[in-house]
Image (tube, helix red, strand yellow):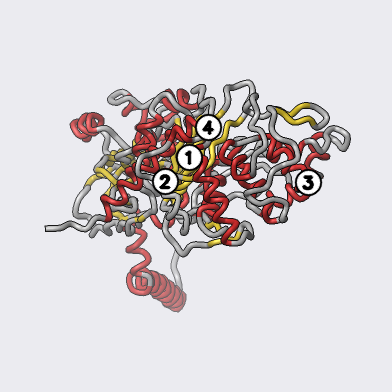
Protein backbone atom coordinates (compact mmCIF):
# COMPACT_ATOMS: atom_id res chain seq x y z
CA UNK A 1 0.00 0.00 0.00
CA UNK A 2 1.52 3.34 -1.06
CA UNK A 3 0.80 6.87 0.11
CA UNK A 4 1.03 10.07 -1.81
CA UNK A 5 3.98 12.22 -0.65
CA UNK A 6 1.61 15.04 0.34
CA UNK A 7 -0.38 12.67 2.55
CA UNK A 8 2.81 11.55 4.28
CA UNK A 9 3.80 15.19 4.92
CA UNK A 10 0.32 15.93 6.29
CA UNK A 11 0.51 13.04 8.69
CA UNK A 12 4.01 14.00 9.76
CA UNK A 13 2.85 17.55 10.57
CA UNK A 14 -0.08 16.21 12.63
CA UNK A 15 2.26 13.87 14.53
CA UNK A 16 4.65 16.76 15.28
CA UNK A 17 1.76 18.88 16.58
CA UNK A 18 0.53 16.03 18.79
CA UNK A 19 4.04 15.41 20.13
CA UNK A 20 4.58 19.11 20.85
CA UNK A 21 1.20 19.30 22.59
CA UNK A 22 1.95 16.18 24.64
CA UNK A 23 5.39 17.41 25.70
CA UNK A 24 3.98 20.89 26.41
CA UNK A 25 1.29 19.33 28.66
CA UNK A 26 3.82 17.15 30.41
CA UNK A 27 6.19 20.08 30.80
CA UNK A 28 3.42 22.22 32.20
CA UNK A 29 2.44 19.54 34.67
CA UNK A 30 6.08 19.08 35.65
CA UNK A 31 6.50 22.85 36.09
CA UNK A 32 3.33 23.06 38.17
CA UNK A 33 4.37 20.15 40.35
CA UNK A 34 8.04 21.07 40.73
CA UNK A 35 7.81 24.85 40.83
CA UNK A 36 4.33 26.21 41.43
CA UNK A 37 3.17 23.53 43.93
CA UNK A 38 6.52 22.29 45.08
CA UNK A 39 5.90 22.93 48.77
CA UNK A 40 2.50 21.21 48.71
CA UNK A 41 3.82 18.02 47.15
CA UNK A 42 6.94 18.00 49.31
CA UNK A 43 4.63 18.25 52.33
CA UNK A 44 2.53 15.35 51.03
CA UNK A 45 5.63 13.27 50.53
CA UNK A 46 6.88 14.18 53.99
CA UNK A 47 3.49 13.29 55.45
CA UNK A 48 3.67 9.87 53.86
CA UNK A 49 7.23 9.38 55.10
CA UNK A 50 7.03 11.05 58.53
CA UNK A 51 4.68 10.57 61.43
CA UNK A 52 4.20 13.10 64.21
CA UNK A 53 4.55 11.72 67.71
CA UNK A 54 3.08 13.96 70.41
CA UNK A 55 5.28 14.89 73.37
CA UNK A 56 3.10 15.36 76.44
CA UNK A 57 4.05 18.25 78.68
CA UNK A 58 4.08 18.47 82.45
CA UNK A 59 0.92 19.90 84.02
CA UNK A 60 1.16 22.96 86.19
CA UNK A 61 2.34 22.32 89.75
CA UNK A 62 -0.22 23.14 92.46
CA UNK A 63 1.01 24.73 95.69
CA UNK A 64 -0.58 25.51 99.02
CA UNK A 65 -0.43 28.97 100.62
CA UNK A 66 3.01 28.27 102.10
CA UNK A 67 4.58 26.93 98.91
CA UNK A 68 4.19 23.27 99.79
CA UNK A 69 3.45 20.97 96.85
CA UNK A 70 -0.07 19.59 96.54
CA UNK A 71 0.30 18.21 92.99
CA UNK A 72 3.47 17.68 90.98
CA UNK A 73 4.83 15.58 88.11
CA UNK A 74 7.16 12.58 88.11
CA UNK A 75 8.96 10.89 85.21
CA UNK A 76 6.90 8.16 83.56
CA UNK A 77 6.61 6.21 80.32
CA UNK A 78 3.96 5.89 77.68
CA UNK A 79 3.66 3.09 75.12
CA UNK A 80 1.89 3.65 71.81
CA UNK A 81 1.87 2.12 68.36
CA UNK A 82 1.68 3.43 64.80
CA UNK A 83 -0.60 1.51 62.49
CA UNK A 84 -2.10 2.18 59.02
CA UNK A 85 -5.41 0.40 59.65
CA UNK A 86 -7.58 -0.93 62.44
CA UNK A 87 -6.91 -4.51 61.33
CA UNK A 88 -3.15 -4.07 61.47
CA UNK A 89 -3.49 -2.42 64.89
CA UNK A 90 -5.50 -5.36 66.21
CA UNK A 91 -2.90 -7.74 64.83
CA UNK A 92 -0.08 -5.81 66.51
CA UNK A 93 -1.97 -5.76 69.82
CA UNK A 94 -2.47 -9.53 69.67
CA UNK A 95 1.25 -9.97 69.10
CA UNK A 96 2.08 -7.62 71.97
CA UNK A 97 -0.31 -9.41 74.31
CA UNK A 98 1.87 -12.52 73.97
CA UNK A 99 4.79 -10.54 75.40
CA UNK A 100 3.12 -8.34 78.00
CA UNK A 101 -0.29 -8.39 79.62
CA UNK A 102 -2.85 -6.41 77.59
CA UNK A 103 -6.41 -7.40 78.39
CA UNK A 104 -9.33 -7.16 75.98
CA UNK A 105 -10.56 -3.88 77.51
CA UNK A 106 -7.17 -2.23 76.96
CA UNK A 107 -7.06 -3.49 73.38
CA UNK A 108 -10.55 -2.16 72.68
CA UNK A 109 -9.57 1.20 74.17
CA UNK A 110 -6.48 1.43 71.96
CA UNK A 111 -8.67 0.75 68.90
CA UNK A 112 -11.09 3.52 69.96
CA UNK A 113 -8.18 5.90 70.35
CA UNK A 114 -6.95 5.04 66.85
CA UNK A 115 -10.37 5.62 65.32
CA UNK A 116 -10.67 8.97 67.07
CA UNK A 117 -7.25 10.14 65.79
CA UNK A 118 -5.90 7.83 63.01
CA UNK A 119 -2.85 10.00 62.30
CA UNK A 120 -1.61 9.83 65.91
CA UNK A 121 0.02 6.84 67.56
CA UNK A 122 -2.60 4.78 69.38
CA UNK A 123 -1.81 4.86 73.10
CA UNK A 124 -1.64 1.44 74.77
CA UNK A 125 -0.33 2.50 78.19
CA UNK A 126 -0.42 6.07 79.49
CA UNK A 127 1.65 5.11 82.49
CA UNK A 128 3.70 2.01 81.74
CA UNK A 129 5.71 0.41 84.50
CA UNK A 130 9.48 0.18 84.22
CA UNK A 131 9.16 -3.59 83.99
CA UNK A 132 6.85 -3.36 80.97
CA UNK A 133 9.13 -0.82 79.28
CA UNK A 134 12.18 -3.02 79.88
CA UNK A 135 10.54 -6.06 78.29
CA UNK A 136 9.38 -4.07 75.27
CA UNK A 137 12.76 -2.41 74.76
CA UNK A 138 14.42 -5.81 74.62
CA UNK A 139 12.06 -6.96 71.87
CA UNK A 140 11.46 -3.67 70.09
CA UNK A 141 12.70 -5.12 66.77
CA UNK A 142 9.70 -7.46 66.73
CA UNK A 143 7.29 -4.51 66.78
CA UNK A 144 8.42 -1.90 64.19
CA UNK A 145 5.51 0.49 64.87
CA UNK A 146 6.06 0.59 68.63
CA UNK A 147 6.86 3.93 70.29
CA UNK A 148 8.15 4.11 73.86
CA UNK A 149 8.83 7.54 75.29
CA UNK A 150 9.07 9.40 78.54
CA UNK A 151 5.87 11.12 79.67
CA UNK A 152 5.41 13.08 82.90
CA UNK A 153 2.78 11.60 85.20
CA UNK A 154 0.82 13.33 87.95
CA UNK A 155 1.71 12.65 91.55
CA UNK A 156 0.12 13.78 94.80
CA UNK A 157 2.47 13.57 97.81
CA UNK A 158 -0.50 13.65 100.22
CA UNK A 159 -2.97 11.77 98.05
CA UNK A 160 -5.53 10.69 100.64
CA UNK A 161 -5.44 13.99 102.52
CA UNK A 162 -6.29 16.02 99.39
CA UNK A 163 -8.52 13.63 97.41
CA UNK A 164 -11.73 15.63 97.95
CA UNK A 165 -9.94 18.86 97.06
CA UNK A 166 -7.70 18.08 94.13
CA UNK A 167 -9.43 15.41 92.05
CA UNK A 168 -7.07 13.55 89.72
CA UNK A 169 -6.08 13.33 86.06
CA UNK A 170 -7.24 10.76 83.56
CA UNK A 171 -7.64 10.15 79.86
CA UNK A 172 -10.13 12.41 78.13
CA UNK A 173 -13.37 10.59 77.39
CA UNK A 174 -15.28 10.44 74.11
CA UNK A 175 -18.05 12.53 75.70
CA UNK A 176 -15.56 15.19 76.74
CA UNK A 177 -14.02 15.31 73.26
CA UNK A 178 -17.44 16.37 71.94
CA UNK A 179 -17.72 19.27 74.41
CA UNK A 180 -16.79 22.85 73.41
CA UNK A 181 -14.74 23.13 76.63
CA UNK A 182 -12.32 20.53 75.26
CA UNK A 183 -11.99 21.83 71.72
CA UNK A 184 -8.51 21.08 70.42
CA UNK A 185 -7.96 18.04 72.65
CA UNK A 186 -7.06 14.68 71.09
CA UNK A 187 -7.88 11.12 72.08
CA UNK A 188 -5.42 9.73 74.61
CA UNK A 189 -4.59 13.09 76.22
CA UNK A 190 -4.85 13.59 79.97
CA UNK A 191 -7.32 16.01 81.56
CA UNK A 192 -8.44 16.93 85.06
CA UNK A 193 -11.17 14.79 86.58
CA UNK A 194 -12.89 16.41 89.52
CA UNK A 195 -11.61 18.95 92.03
CA UNK A 196 -9.05 21.61 91.17
CA UNK A 197 -7.64 19.48 88.36
CA UNK A 198 -10.95 19.80 86.51
CA UNK A 199 -11.85 23.34 87.60
CA UNK A 200 -8.53 24.81 86.49
CA UNK A 201 -7.86 22.53 83.52
CA UNK A 202 -7.19 25.48 81.12
CA UNK A 203 -4.57 26.89 83.51
CA UNK A 204 -2.96 23.53 84.36
CA UNK A 205 -2.84 22.09 80.84
CA UNK A 206 0.59 21.98 79.22
CA UNK A 207 1.19 22.83 75.57
CA UNK A 208 1.90 19.56 73.80
CA UNK A 209 5.16 19.27 71.85
CA UNK A 210 6.00 16.92 68.99
CA UNK A 211 8.76 14.87 67.43
CA UNK A 212 8.83 12.92 64.17
CA UNK A 213 9.69 9.38 63.16
CA UNK A 214 10.28 8.04 59.65
CA UNK A 215 8.06 5.19 58.48
CA UNK A 216 7.90 2.93 55.45
CA UNK A 217 4.88 2.21 53.27
CA UNK A 218 3.54 -0.21 55.90
CA UNK A 219 3.78 2.40 58.67
CA UNK A 220 6.72 0.67 60.31
CA UNK A 221 9.23 2.92 62.05
CA UNK A 222 12.51 2.86 60.16
CA UNK A 223 14.19 5.87 61.80
CA UNK A 224 13.40 7.20 65.26
CA UNK A 225 15.86 10.02 65.91
CA UNK A 226 17.07 13.09 64.06
CA UNK A 227 14.33 13.00 61.43
CA UNK A 228 13.22 16.58 62.03
CA UNK A 229 13.73 19.12 64.78
CA UNK A 230 11.54 18.52 67.82
CA UNK A 231 9.01 21.04 69.13
CA UNK A 232 9.43 20.84 72.91
CA UNK A 233 6.35 20.90 75.15
CA UNK A 234 5.73 23.91 77.38
CA UNK A 235 4.63 23.67 81.00
CA UNK A 236 2.17 26.27 82.34
CA UNK A 237 2.93 28.43 85.38
CA UNK A 238 2.14 26.94 88.80
CA UNK A 239 -1.24 27.30 90.47
CA UNK A 240 -1.10 28.79 93.96
CA UNK A 241 -3.98 28.16 96.32
CA UNK A 242 -5.29 29.33 99.70
CA UNK A 243 -5.06 25.79 101.05
CA UNK A 244 -3.10 25.06 104.23
CA UNK A 245 -1.65 21.64 103.50
CA UNK A 246 -0.65 21.09 107.12
CA UNK A 247 -4.30 21.52 108.16
CA UNK A 248 -5.40 19.09 105.42
CA UNK A 249 -2.94 16.50 106.68
CA UNK A 250 -4.00 17.01 110.28
CA UNK A 251 -7.67 16.54 109.40
CA UNK A 252 -6.81 13.30 107.62
CA UNK A 253 -4.78 12.08 110.59
CA UNK A 254 -7.55 12.95 113.04
CA UNK A 255 -10.31 11.23 111.07
CA UNK A 256 -8.11 8.21 110.37
CA UNK A 257 -9.93 5.03 109.39
CA UNK A 258 -12.58 5.23 112.09
CA UNK A 259 -14.47 8.51 111.54
CA UNK A 260 -16.71 9.54 108.64
CA UNK A 261 -17.61 13.10 107.77
CA UNK A 262 -16.16 16.31 106.43
CA UNK A 263 -14.17 19.41 107.34
CA UNK A 264 -14.30 22.83 105.71
CA UNK A 265 -12.13 25.71 106.91
CA UNK A 266 -12.33 29.28 105.57
CA UNK A 267 -10.66 32.61 106.12
CA UNK A 268 -13.38 34.84 107.61
CA UNK A 269 -12.79 38.03 105.63
CA UNK A 270 -11.78 36.75 102.19
CA UNK A 271 -13.51 33.37 101.99
CA UNK A 272 -10.13 31.78 101.23
CA UNK A 273 -10.47 27.99 101.56
CA UNK A 274 -7.95 26.69 104.09
CA UNK A 275 -9.07 23.07 103.97
CA UNK A 276 -11.64 20.78 102.34
CA UNK A 277 -11.58 17.23 103.58
CA UNK A 278 -13.98 14.30 103.21
CA UNK A 279 -13.73 10.97 105.04
CA UNK A 280 -13.36 8.17 104.25
CA UNK A 281 -10.83 9.14 101.62
CA UNK A 282 -9.02 7.16 98.91
CA UNK A 283 -5.68 7.07 97.09
CA UNK A 284 -5.94 9.31 94.01
CA UNK A 285 -2.44 8.26 92.90
CA UNK A 286 -3.95 4.90 91.97
CA UNK A 287 -6.10 6.69 89.36
CA UNK A 288 -3.11 8.05 87.44
CA UNK A 289 -2.59 6.28 84.12
CA UNK A 290 -5.95 4.53 84.47
CA UNK A 291 -7.48 3.11 87.63
CA UNK A 292 -7.74 -0.66 87.86
CA UNK A 293 -11.26 -2.04 87.59
CA UNK A 294 -10.84 -3.95 90.87
CA UNK A 295 -9.87 -0.84 92.87
CA UNK A 296 -12.61 1.28 91.30
CA UNK A 297 -15.20 -1.41 91.99
CA UNK A 298 -13.97 -1.63 95.57
CA UNK A 299 -14.51 2.14 96.01
CA UNK A 300 -17.94 2.04 94.36
CA UNK A 301 -19.14 -0.85 96.47
CA UNK A 302 -17.66 0.46 99.72
CA UNK A 303 -20.32 0.82 102.41
CA UNK A 304 -19.33 4.41 103.23
CA UNK A 305 -18.84 5.72 99.67
CA UNK A 306 -15.33 7.23 99.72
CA UNK A 307 -15.83 8.72 96.24
CA UNK A 308 -18.62 10.93 97.62
CA UNK A 309 -17.35 14.41 98.52
CA UNK A 310 -19.15 15.09 101.78
CA UNK A 311 -17.72 18.59 102.17
CA UNK A 312 -19.29 19.93 98.94
CA UNK A 313 -22.03 17.46 98.13
CA UNK A 314 -23.06 16.07 101.50
CA UNK A 315 -26.39 17.58 102.58
CA UNK A 316 -27.23 17.11 106.23
CA UNK A 317 -29.76 18.53 108.69
CA UNK A 318 -27.73 21.38 110.24
CA UNK A 319 -29.39 20.79 113.62
CA UNK A 320 -28.57 23.32 116.34
CA UNK A 321 -25.86 25.04 114.29
CA UNK A 322 -28.83 26.54 112.41
CA UNK A 323 -30.32 28.08 115.57
CA UNK A 324 -28.10 31.10 114.99
CA UNK A 325 -30.04 31.78 111.79
CA UNK A 326 -33.29 31.72 113.76
CA UNK A 327 -31.75 34.04 116.34
CA UNK A 328 -30.48 36.49 113.71
CA UNK A 329 -33.87 36.62 111.98
CA UNK A 330 -35.63 37.20 115.29
CA UNK A 331 -33.24 40.02 116.16
CA UNK A 332 -33.59 41.62 112.72
CA UNK A 333 -37.37 41.65 113.15
CA UNK A 334 -37.06 43.21 116.60
CA UNK A 335 -38.71 40.21 118.27
CA UNK A 336 -35.86 39.41 120.65
CA UNK A 337 -32.61 40.62 122.13
CA UNK A 338 -30.01 38.50 123.87
CA UNK A 339 -31.79 39.20 127.17
CA UNK A 340 -35.28 38.18 126.00
CA UNK A 341 -37.07 35.32 127.78
CA UNK A 342 -39.89 33.31 126.23
CA UNK A 343 -43.39 32.96 127.68
CA UNK A 344 -42.96 29.32 128.59
CA UNK A 345 -39.84 28.09 130.35
CA UNK A 346 -38.20 24.88 129.13
CA UNK A 347 -39.44 21.85 131.08
CA UNK A 348 -38.07 19.31 128.62
CA UNK A 349 -40.73 19.76 125.96
CA UNK A 350 -43.20 22.11 124.31
CA UNK A 351 -46.82 21.35 123.40
CA UNK A 352 -48.05 22.49 119.96
CA UNK A 353 -50.64 19.98 118.79
CA UNK A 354 -48.29 17.37 120.23
CA UNK A 355 -45.24 17.47 122.44
CA UNK A 356 -42.04 18.66 120.76
CA UNK A 357 -39.16 17.51 122.95
CA UNK A 358 -36.02 19.38 123.99
CA UNK A 359 -32.77 17.47 123.71
CA UNK A 360 -32.37 17.81 127.50
CA UNK A 361 -35.30 16.00 129.07
CA UNK A 362 -34.65 17.74 132.40
CA UNK A 363 -35.35 21.11 130.79
CA UNK A 364 -33.42 24.39 130.89
CA UNK A 365 -35.90 26.49 132.84
CA UNK A 366 -36.57 30.19 132.23
CA UNK A 367 -33.61 31.39 130.17
CA UNK A 368 -32.60 34.27 127.89
CA UNK A 369 -31.66 34.00 124.20
CA UNK A 370 -27.95 34.17 125.10
CA UNK A 371 -28.40 31.26 127.51
CA UNK A 372 -30.53 29.36 124.98
CA UNK A 373 -27.68 29.58 122.46
CA UNK A 374 -25.09 28.45 124.99
CA UNK A 375 -27.25 25.55 126.24
CA UNK A 376 -28.85 24.86 122.82
CA UNK A 377 -32.37 24.87 124.24
CA UNK A 378 -34.85 23.56 121.67
CA UNK A 379 -37.93 24.81 123.52
CA UNK A 380 -36.70 28.40 123.41
CA UNK A 381 -36.21 28.22 119.63
CA UNK A 382 -39.57 26.49 119.07
CA UNK A 383 -41.24 29.55 120.52
CA UNK A 384 -39.00 31.99 118.66
CA UNK A 385 -39.76 30.19 115.41
CA UNK A 386 -43.50 30.54 116.03
CA UNK A 387 -43.08 34.27 116.66
CA UNK A 388 -41.16 34.72 113.42
CA UNK A 389 -43.76 32.69 111.54
CA UNK A 390 -43.30 30.15 108.80
CA UNK A 391 -43.49 32.56 105.88
CA UNK A 392 -40.94 34.97 107.32
CA UNK A 393 -38.67 32.13 108.44
CA UNK A 394 -38.62 30.63 104.93
CA UNK A 395 -37.97 33.99 103.27
CA UNK A 396 -35.29 34.80 105.84
CA UNK A 397 -33.54 31.48 105.23
CA UNK A 398 -33.42 32.23 101.50
CA UNK A 399 -31.93 35.67 102.19
CA UNK A 400 -29.29 34.17 104.47
CA UNK A 401 -28.17 31.91 101.61
CA UNK A 402 -29.49 28.56 102.82
CA UNK A 403 -31.19 27.80 99.51
CA UNK A 404 -28.21 28.55 97.27
CA UNK A 405 -24.83 27.02 96.57
CA UNK A 406 -21.83 29.11 97.62
CA UNK A 407 -20.23 29.47 94.17
CA UNK A 408 -16.90 27.98 95.26
CA UNK A 409 -14.34 27.52 92.47
CA UNK A 410 -14.68 23.74 92.46
CA UNK A 411 -16.98 21.38 90.56
CA UNK A 412 -19.56 19.17 92.21
CA UNK A 413 -21.05 21.49 94.82
CA UNK A 414 -24.64 20.53 95.68
CA UNK A 415 -27.33 23.13 96.26
CA UNK A 416 -28.66 22.98 99.84
CA UNK A 417 -32.27 22.06 100.49
CA UNK A 418 -34.32 24.87 101.97
CA UNK A 419 -37.99 25.59 101.15
CA UNK A 420 -38.30 28.96 99.40
CA UNK A 421 -41.99 29.23 100.31
CA UNK A 422 -44.94 27.17 101.55
CA UNK A 423 -45.49 26.05 97.94
CA UNK A 424 -42.61 23.63 98.56
CA UNK A 425 -44.68 21.73 101.14
CA UNK A 426 -47.77 21.74 98.90
CA UNK A 427 -45.78 20.19 96.07
CA UNK A 428 -44.09 17.60 98.28
CA UNK A 429 -46.87 16.58 100.65
CA UNK A 430 -50.04 17.95 99.05
CA UNK A 431 -52.00 20.98 100.38
CA UNK A 432 -53.48 18.90 103.21
CA UNK A 433 -50.45 16.75 103.89
CA UNK A 434 -48.67 19.16 106.22
CA UNK A 435 -49.36 21.84 108.83
CA UNK A 436 -47.56 24.90 110.14
CA UNK A 437 -46.03 23.04 113.05
CA UNK A 438 -43.20 22.40 110.59
CA UNK A 439 -41.87 25.81 111.67
CA UNK A 440 -40.84 24.29 115.02
CA UNK A 441 -38.58 21.71 113.40
CA UNK A 442 -37.19 24.19 110.89
CA UNK A 443 -36.31 26.65 113.66
CA UNK A 444 -33.92 24.12 115.23
CA UNK A 445 -32.34 22.94 111.96
CA UNK A 446 -34.34 19.77 111.31
CA UNK A 447 -37.18 18.82 108.92
CA UNK A 448 -36.85 20.02 105.31
CA UNK A 449 -33.49 21.68 105.85
CA UNK A 450 -30.31 20.05 104.55
CA UNK A 451 -27.09 22.04 104.31
CA UNK A 452 -23.58 21.29 103.13
CA UNK A 453 -20.65 21.78 105.52
CA UNK A 454 -19.34 24.39 103.07
CA UNK A 455 -22.54 26.43 103.23
CA UNK A 456 -22.63 26.35 107.02
CA UNK A 457 -19.01 27.51 107.16
CA UNK A 458 -19.86 30.39 104.82
CA UNK A 459 -22.77 31.51 107.04
CA UNK A 460 -20.55 31.54 110.11
CA UNK A 461 -18.01 33.77 108.36
CA UNK A 462 -20.75 36.42 108.41
CA UNK A 463 -21.32 35.83 112.14
CA UNK A 464 -17.58 36.04 112.80
CA UNK A 465 -17.12 39.34 110.93
CA UNK A 466 -19.64 42.02 110.02
CA UNK A 467 -22.68 40.26 108.55
CA UNK A 468 -21.02 39.88 105.15
CA UNK A 469 -19.94 36.54 103.68
CA UNK A 470 -17.35 36.13 100.94
CA UNK A 471 -17.65 33.57 98.16
CA UNK A 472 -15.33 30.67 99.11
CA UNK A 473 -12.23 30.63 96.92
CA UNK A 474 -9.58 27.93 96.68
CA UNK A 475 -7.42 29.97 94.31
CA UNK A 476 -6.96 33.54 95.54
CA UNK A 477 -8.78 36.32 93.74
CA UNK A 478 -10.50 39.56 94.70
CA UNK A 479 -13.07 38.62 97.40
CA UNK A 480 -16.75 38.86 96.47
CA UNK A 481 -18.57 39.73 99.70
CA UNK A 482 -22.35 39.73 100.12
CA UNK A 483 -24.37 41.07 103.03
CA UNK A 484 -26.41 38.28 104.59
CA UNK A 485 -28.11 40.07 107.47
CA UNK A 486 -28.47 43.53 108.96
CA UNK A 487 -27.67 43.68 112.66
CA UNK A 488 -26.25 46.68 114.46
CA UNK A 489 -22.65 46.37 115.71
CA UNK A 490 -24.01 45.98 119.24
CA UNK A 491 -26.40 43.22 118.22
CA UNK A 492 -23.72 41.37 116.28
CA UNK A 493 -21.33 41.66 119.23
CA UNK A 494 -23.95 40.11 121.51
CA UNK A 495 -24.32 37.18 119.11
CA UNK A 496 -20.56 36.68 119.06
CA UNK A 497 -20.39 36.72 122.87
CA UNK A 498 -23.15 34.10 123.01
CA UNK A 499 -21.19 31.89 120.59
CA UNK A 500 -18.11 32.26 122.79
CA UNK A 501 -20.21 31.16 125.79
CA UNK A 502 -21.05 27.91 123.95
CA UNK A 503 -17.39 26.88 124.21
CA UNK A 504 -16.56 28.50 127.54
CA UNK A 505 -19.56 27.18 129.52
CA UNK A 506 -22.11 25.68 127.15
CA UNK A 507 -22.53 22.50 125.13
CA UNK A 508 -18.94 22.63 123.82
CA UNK A 509 -17.28 23.38 127.17
CA UNK A 510 -15.39 20.10 127.02
CA UNK A 511 -13.64 21.25 123.84
CA UNK A 512 -11.86 24.29 125.32
CA UNK A 513 -8.22 24.87 124.40
CA UNK A 514 -6.06 26.53 127.02
CA UNK A 515 -4.88 29.94 125.89
CA UNK A 516 -7.26 30.09 122.91
CA UNK A 517 -10.74 31.63 122.92
CA UNK A 518 -13.10 29.84 120.55
CA UNK A 519 -16.66 30.68 119.52
CA UNK A 520 -19.10 28.34 117.79
CA UNK A 521 -22.14 26.13 117.99
CA UNK A 522 -22.64 22.42 118.41
CA UNK A 523 -25.36 20.47 116.66
CA UNK A 524 -26.75 16.94 116.93
CA UNK A 525 -28.59 15.99 113.74
CA UNK A 526 -31.17 13.20 113.72
CA UNK A 527 -30.71 10.99 110.64
CA UNK A 528 -32.80 7.84 111.24
CA UNK A 529 -32.16 4.93 111.08
CA UNK A 530 -28.50 5.84 111.71
CA UNK A 531 -27.10 7.17 114.94
CA UNK A 532 -27.11 10.96 115.36
CA UNK A 533 -24.62 13.05 113.39
CA UNK A 534 -22.35 15.48 115.25
CA UNK A 535 -21.86 19.08 114.07
CA UNK A 536 -19.68 21.96 115.14
CA UNK A 537 -19.32 25.27 113.31
CA UNK A 538 -17.20 28.00 114.83
CA UNK A 539 -14.22 30.30 114.63
CA UNK A 540 -11.05 31.31 116.48
CA UNK A 541 -9.72 33.38 118.07
CA UNK A 542 -13.12 34.57 119.23
CA UNK A 543 -12.08 38.24 119.39
CA UNK A 544 -10.08 38.37 116.12
CA UNK A 545 -11.12 35.41 113.95
CA UNK A 546 -8.50 33.93 111.64
CA UNK A 547 -10.29 30.68 110.81
CA UNK A 548 -13.91 29.56 110.48
CA UNK A 549 -14.35 25.80 110.58
CA UNK A 550 -17.34 23.52 109.97
CA UNK A 551 -17.12 19.85 110.80
CA UNK A 552 -19.61 17.01 110.69
CA UNK A 553 -18.99 13.50 112.00
CA UNK A 554 -21.46 10.92 110.80
CA UNK A 555 -22.85 8.88 113.69
CA UNK A 556 -20.75 11.02 116.02
CA UNK A 557 -23.71 10.96 118.46
CA UNK A 558 -23.37 14.47 119.92
CA UNK A 559 -22.12 17.85 118.79
CA UNK A 560 -19.57 17.92 121.61
CA UNK A 561 -17.70 15.13 119.78
CA UNK A 562 -17.34 17.30 116.69
CA UNK A 563 -16.40 20.32 118.83
CA UNK A 564 -13.42 18.48 120.32
CA UNK A 565 -12.06 17.64 116.88
CA UNK A 566 -12.78 21.13 115.51
CA UNK A 567 -10.98 22.98 118.28
CA UNK A 568 -7.91 20.78 117.86
CA UNK A 569 -7.86 21.58 114.15
CA UNK A 570 -8.22 25.31 114.86
CA UNK A 571 -5.39 25.17 117.37
CA UNK A 572 -3.18 23.35 114.87
CA UNK A 573 -3.87 25.90 112.15
CA UNK A 574 -3.24 28.92 114.35
CA UNK A 575 0.02 27.48 115.67
CA UNK A 576 1.15 26.69 112.12
CA UNK A 577 0.20 30.20 111.02
CA UNK A 578 2.28 31.76 113.79
CA UNK A 579 5.24 29.49 112.91
CA UNK A 580 5.03 30.22 109.17
CA UNK A 581 4.76 33.96 109.76
CA UNK A 582 7.54 34.11 112.32
CA UNK A 583 10.48 36.29 111.36
CA UNK A 584 13.82 34.53 111.90
CA UNK A 585 16.10 36.24 114.40
CA UNK A 586 19.84 36.04 114.84
Labelled disc at residue 559: 4
Labelled disc at residue 127: none
Tell me the distance, in whole angstroms, between the alpha carbons under discs 4 and 3.
27 Å
Tag 3 secondary structure: loop
Quadrant in which the C terminus is drawn: bottom left
Q: Which residue is mark 2?
A: 517
Tag 2 secondary structure: loop
Q: Local crowd at mark 1 within 10 Å, few (<14), some, or many (≥20)?
A: many
Q: Nearer the viewer, mark 4 or mark 2?
A: 2
Question: Is 375 drawn above or below residue 409 in the view shown?
Answer: above
Q: Local crowd at mark 4 within 10 Å, few (<14), some, or many (≥20)?
A: many
Tag 1 secondary structure: helix
Q: Pick whichever of labels 4 and 1 is earlier in the sequence.
A: 1
Question: Is 186 drawn above or below residue 442 in the view shown?
Answer: below
Q: Nearer the viewer, mark 2 or mark 3?
A: 2
Tag 4 secondary structure: helix
Mark 3–mark 1 contact, CB under 8 Å?
A: no
Labelled disc at residue 503: 1
Question: Is 12 drawn above or below residue 104 in the view shown?
Answer: below
| Residue 212 seen in the figure | no
Q: Residue furthest left?
A: 586
| Residue 368: % across, % down | 64, 43
| Residue 319: % across, % down | 61, 36
Q: Local crowd at mark 2 within 10 Å, few (<14), some, or many (≥20)?
A: some
Q: Nearer the viewer, mark 3 or mark 1?
A: 1
Labelled disc at residue 389: 3
Tell me the distance, in whole angstroms, between the alpha carbons under discs 2 and 3.
35 Å
Amino acid sequence: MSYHPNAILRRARVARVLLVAAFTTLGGAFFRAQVLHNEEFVLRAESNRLREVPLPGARGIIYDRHGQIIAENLPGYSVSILSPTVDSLRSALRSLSRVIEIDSAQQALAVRRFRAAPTRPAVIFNDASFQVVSVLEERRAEFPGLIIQSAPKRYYPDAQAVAALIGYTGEISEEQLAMPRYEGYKAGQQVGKGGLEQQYEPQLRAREGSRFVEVDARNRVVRDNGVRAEVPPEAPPPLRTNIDLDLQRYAHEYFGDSLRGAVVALEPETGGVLAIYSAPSYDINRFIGGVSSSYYRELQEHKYKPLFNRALSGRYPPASTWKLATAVLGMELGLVTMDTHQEQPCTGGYYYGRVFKCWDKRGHGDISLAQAIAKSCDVYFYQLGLKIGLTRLLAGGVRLGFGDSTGIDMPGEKTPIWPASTAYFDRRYGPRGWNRSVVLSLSIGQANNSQTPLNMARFYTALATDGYAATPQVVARTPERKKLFDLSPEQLKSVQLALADVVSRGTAAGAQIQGLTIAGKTGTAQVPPEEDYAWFVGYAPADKPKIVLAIIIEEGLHGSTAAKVATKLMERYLKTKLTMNAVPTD
